[in-house]
Image (spheres, rainbow, N blue to C red):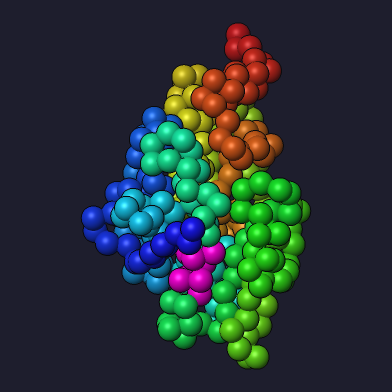
Amino acid sequence: MQRTILTSGLTPEHTDLYCKCLEDWSPETLESGDHKRRWYDKYGARGLRVRLSFDDKGTVAGMIQFLPIEHSFAEGRDLYVVLCIWVHGHKQGRGDFRGRGMGQALLAGAEAEARDLGAKGMAAWGLWLPFWMKASWFRRQGYRRADRDGIRVLMWKPFSDEARPPRWIRRRKKPGRTPGVVSVTSFLDGWCTAQNIVHERAKRAAAEFGDRIVFQTIDTSERDVFLEWGIGSGLFVDGDEVRTGPPPSYDKLRRLIERRVARLPRSR
């Protein structure tokens, strides 16, 4: 039986739900702080667009967020970039809405809106590994590869012959070490709830070790700061990058920091 899928732009009624990535039921989401809301308030004035999908009972089941490439992690012109598509797939909370065509409906709605706004094409990032934001899924929606950086693939779909492919903005430098202490550096752009959780957990874990830790937050929601580093979101301990997808637990981050603290020379 054909299911009805409706999509629409974001309204004030659903803004808080969007800022929790539809997981208002999750205790983990509560750990993410207010970074997503502050990012949304800032980027709403910079062309950010959000669309939601609903099932035939009016339940919010999926979301897509996209913005002009000039405010994204990629280089290009006259394009919009999909930051993420998320169709709620947990049994808890809202339920599992995967496999109903909602992702395709959200992407089609975003493409139509971008065309109406004068875009010459749409870009999206994906992973060539078979999990979150799969590049292969975008390929099935008519996208092709524009650039690759490690496991990250930048995909795009031109709307006109005048469109030009986008390129990744690659890492330009990374944080170093501070003698005599453990350096924990969190790059925070705010748009991803999962990365906001990592930031808050790392900050809380670092605070347990007092002056043996130097914790620094680098706000990459500002374009000039992002371009300086070429890092949108990430966590580094003594200059070494920590894998943050999926978000490591608070206990895991605390143990990692504790091991680094144990290597510090003992004070006399």
Left or right? Give the position of 208 relative to 245.
left
Q: Residue at x 66, y 54 (%)?
A: 134
Q: Quadrant of residue 168?
A: bottom right
From this view, report whether residue 97 is shown above or below residue 161: above
- Identify the residue at the far left of this view: 13
From where the camera sits, is residue 113 visible? yes
Counting from the top left corner in percent of width and height, residue 133 is at 61, 53
From this view, report whether residue 176 is shown above or below residue 49: above
Q: Residue at x 43, y 82 (%)?
A: 117
Q: Residue at x 49, y 65 (%)?
A: 105
Q: Quadrant of residue 157?
A: bottom right
Count of all numbered marks drawn on residues in the image? 0
From where the camera sits, is residue 70 visible? no
Residue 107 lies in the magenta-colored region? yes
From this view, report whether residue 183 is shown above or below residue 116: above
Q: Which residues are magenta?
A: 103-111
Q: Which secondary structure type mostly characterizes the magenta part of the structure?
A: helix
| Quadrant where the C terminus is found in the figure | top right
Counting from the top left corner in percent of width and height, residue 116 is at 43, 83
